[in-house]
Amino acid sequence: MTTLRIHTIIRAYRRSHSLTQTQFGELLGVTAQAVSKWERQLCYPDITLLPALARVLGVSLEYLLGADDAS
């Protein structure tokens, strides 16, 4: 079974682009608190956000969900 690594991908992207959690959240229309919870693995993004999240991160949905090792 593949472990979801969404939290790692989000945190790495946000930091590499020097974005605050607030700024990253604004790209997706969510709060900084939501981004914080995702990064700390307290919860996952809503399924309806996954296509937009993949677009913002520049990765495929398969990669985001751990089903593909290449973006």
Image (tube, grey):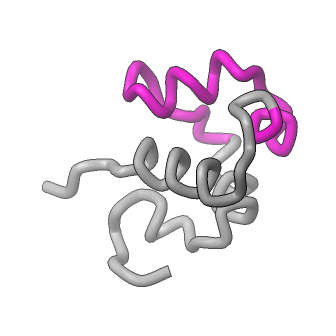
Q: Residue 65: image x %, image y %?
A: 42, 57
For the residue pair 1 and 32, the one nearer the viewer reads as 32
Magenta-tinted stretch: 23-48
63 horizontally vs 59: left or right: left
Question: Residue at (44%, 69%) from the top-left corner?
Answer: 63
Question: Residue at (40%, 19%) from the top-left corner?
Answer: 42
Q: Quadrant of the N terminus?
A: bottom left
Q: Residue 53: image x %, image y %?
A: 68, 52
Q: Residue 31: image x %, image y %?
A: 76, 21
10 horizontally vs 17: left or right: left
For the residue pair 69 and 10, the one nearer the viewer reads as 10
Quadrant of residue 55 within the rendered picture: bottom right
Quadrant of residue 59 within the rendered picture: bottom right
29 horizontally vs 42: left or right: right
- State whether the magenta stretch is mostly helix, strand or loop: helix
Question: Residue at (34%, 62%) from the top-left corner?
Answer: 66
For the residue pair 19 and 39, the one nearer the viewer reads as 19
Quadrant of residue 26 within the rendered picture: top right
1 horizontally vs 7: left or right: left
